Image: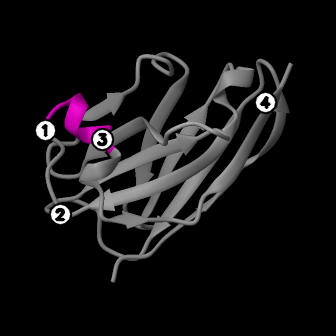
Amino acid sequence: QVQLAESGGGSVQTGGSLRLSCVVSVYIGIGSKWCMGWFRQAPGKEREGVAAFSTSSVRQYYADSVKGRFTLSRDYGKKTLYLQMDSLKPEDTGMYYCAADKSDCDGVSEALDKYEYNYWGQGTQVTVSS
């Protein structure tokens, strides 16, 4: 069973920054084959893909709404995936989830599709005030 644990959420003002962390219970380093993603869900809205990357191809994928503001990184030794969020906007508010799937992420549509993922964390809340 794959376990994911997010942390790092909080409340910031518009223009602020946060770094989310996701600790994973499986090896996500060189030679592994996982699609790792970040998703968010605002109240009353569908869960949407924010960013994802393939551990095998190390390709990264971002939603248009966060390109240039959010950055993925990872520490293989710590089995941790990070999402650096800069220039935050009120519309970035929501519960942020880390997700994993035992597959390659082949293209942005697949990588940011919540139905492609089998394993989910509990989420961490991000609130951006104007």
Extreme residue in the front direction: 44
Extreme residue in the bottom direction: 1
* Category of crowding for the residue at label 3, using alpha-carbon neighbours closer than 10 angstroms: few (below 14), some (14–19), many (at least 20): some
Q: Is residue 130 left or right of residue 7?
A: right
Please state which amino acid type lies under the numbered disc 1.
Asp
Q: Earlier in the sequence, mark 3 or mark 4?
A: 3
* Category of crowding for the residue at label 2, using alpha-carbon neighbours closer than 10 angstroms: few (below 14), some (14–19), many (at least 20): some
Q: CA distance from mark 3 to mark 1?
A: 11 Å
Residue 61, given in percent of the width and then of the height, sits at: 31, 31
Please state which amino acid type lies under the numbered disc 4.
Val
Q: Is residue 43 left or right of residue 77?
A: right
The residue under label 4 is: 128
Residue 81, image quadrant:
bottom left
- The numbered dot on residue 113 is 3
Q: Earlier in the sequence, mark 2 or mark 3?
A: 2
Q: Quadrant of the C terminus?
A: top right
Q: CA distance from mark 2 to mark 3?
A: 21 Å
Circle 1 — which element? Answer: loop
Taking the spot 77% from the left edge, 25% from the top edge, the residue there is 16
Q: Earlier in the sequence, mark 4 or mark 2?
A: 2
Q: Earlier in the sequence, mark 3 or mark 1?
A: 1
The residue under label 1 is: 106
Taking the spot 33% from the left edge, 74% from the top edge, the residue there is 26
